Amino acid sequence: MKYDSDGDGRFDTFTYMDGATVLRIEIDKDADGRIDRWEYYGPGKVLERVGISRAGNGVEDTWQYFDPSGAITRVEIASTRGKNGPLINRIEYYEHGRLTRAEEDTDHDGVIDKWETYTGDHLAAVAFDDLHHGAPTRKLVYSADGSVRVEVDQFSAKQTTRRSQ
């Protein structure tokens, strides 16, 4: 089905169905002729995932996932493209609609090297893998008063020192 939601004479919403079952809806929200939003539905007409083109180029680069009640549970973000499409380099996890943690591949090598932890509505800690071995080597812990404490994995620090000698 095609629909002109804003009455400008151009279709901007496209619904793909299997009989009476909605599978996917594509929306051109900014009327530039390219799809900006993709909605994917599962059994029972439940919204499972929304794809977004943050770059505005008609290519999905962010995906929001929902639980059966409609609450967001995860967001996957791709800030780069590989030969087979967007490469997800950040994943955010939500509980009861609040961001609780995030994992990120900051150097785009396919391995998570940054971990964020949230408490309430603020960042509580950030950990980094400075050695590229898949585990945190350094952590910044933020207190409620705004102070920051730095923690270093002593074993990893010794390994770094040995390698540089």
Image (cartoon, grey):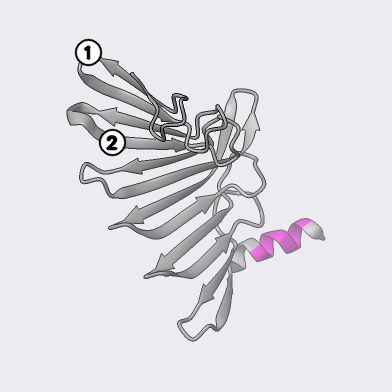
Give residue 128's position: percent from left, percent from top. 59, 59
Q: In the rendered view, does 45 fall on the left or right side of 116?
A: left
Quarter of the image where one finds residue 39: top left
* Depth order, front residue of 43/128: 43
Which numbered disc, 1 or 2, marks the residue that appears first in the sequence? Answer: 1
Residue at 36% x, 41% y is: 65
Q: Amino acid at mark 1?
A: Gly
Dot 1: few (<14), some (14–19), or many (≥20) neighbours within 10 Å? few
- Asked whether 152 falls inside the magenta stretch, the response is no
Quadrant containing the C terminus is bottom right
For residue 103, which numbered disc appears in the image?
Answer: none
Q: Amino acid at mark 2?
A: Leu
Q: In the rendered view, does 163 fall on the left or right side of 138?
A: right
Residue at 55% x, 62% y is: 127
Q: What's the magenta region?
A: 157-163
- For disc 2, the marked residue is 47
Give residue 9's position: percent from left, percent from top. 46, 25
Circles 1 and 2: CB atoms closer than 8 Å: no
What is the CA distance from the residue labelled 1 to the residue labelled 2?
18 Å
Q: Is residue 27 above or below residue 144?
A: above
